[in-house]
Image (cartoon, rainbow, N blue to C red):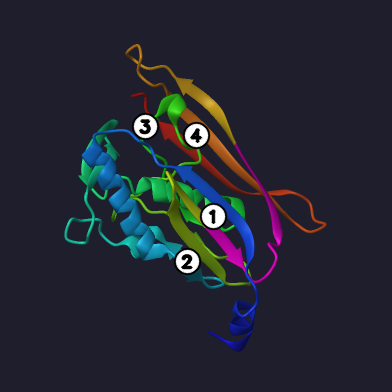
Amino acid sequence: MNQEETDQLASPFLNWETSITPIPRRGTIEIQKNRVHNLERAISLINNRLILPGQAFSLSQHLGEPTIENGFQSGPVFGGGKVLADAGGGLCLIATNLYSLFLKSGCQILERHNHSIDAYGNERFYELGQDAAIAYAYKDLAIRNNFKTPLLLEIGMIGDTVQSRLSAALQKPVEVIVRSHVLQRIPPAIQDQHPGWHICTTRYARKENACWRQDYVSFSHYMPC
């Protein structure tokens, strides 16, 4: 770290963006406890992470393989259009929370995957098109700090929520607007199932006294379930 970066970190950090995600209370008592355990384990591995200018942040790289041997427990995961159980289940909540944080902060999104299904329907805790799934060696959430100042990532559990914050020594240099809209609704094959969706999410950003410009777009496909 050079002297300029050291001087920046010595200044009071300014809040750029916060993200709050409620923790679902679905499943058995054991599943709920394991989900919370996995969230706490993940938080311990990424909290107070400094992301330097130009540096990439990979959620999978910081969490490692979510195995029992690495301190994770069995929790809910989505696979093949179904809700299953596997070690590290529940970590997609961390990915979804951070995706919202980084997206609305204006960071460069390098990799993001939506869930395969809209498992929560009208009870979902994220806006369609703004969730993120993670699967070791298969799906990652990765971003780059495309700003000229180090970014401090803080994340923790407060009550029944996961809350994160991105801050820096400098004022946030851009305004950001994120919008998601439905391209297509896919009716379910069986009554009472959740429909599928095609969603487009677009980010617009502008610097001071500049025009708005589109700097990111993603398309999310959810199968009926």
Task: Using residue 147 as the reference point, say whether residue 45 is left or right of it.
Answer: left
Is 185 magenta? The answer is no
Whichever of callouts 1 and 3 sits on the residue coming sooner in the sequence is 1
Label 1: how many Cα within 10 Å (few below 14, some 14–19, many 20+): many
Q: Which residue is mark 1?
A: 102
Element carrying mark 3? loop
Residue 176: image location, x then y, percent: 67, 50
Is 173 magenta? The answer is yes
Q: Which mark is residue 117?
A: 3
- The residues tagged by marks 1 and 4 sit, at their Cα atoms, a distance apart of 17 Å
Label 3: how many Cα within 10 Å (few below 14, some 14–19, many 20+): many
Element carrying mark 1? helix
Mark 3 touches mark 2? (CB < 8 Å): no
What residue sits 49% from the left and 71% below the top?
50
What residue sits 52% from the left and 35% below the top?
127
Q: Which residue is mark 4?
A: 128
Whichever of callouts 3 and 2 sits on the residue coming sooner in the sequence is 2
Residue 85: image location, x then y, percent: 21, 40
Quarter of the C terminus within the rendering: top left
Label 4: how many Cα within 10 Å (few below 14, some 14–19, many 20+): many
**Image quarter of residue 65:** bottom left
Instruction: State which region is magenta.
Output: 165-179
Element carrying mark 2? strand
Mark 3 touches mark 4? (CB < 8 Å): no
Q: Which residue is mark 2?
A: 56
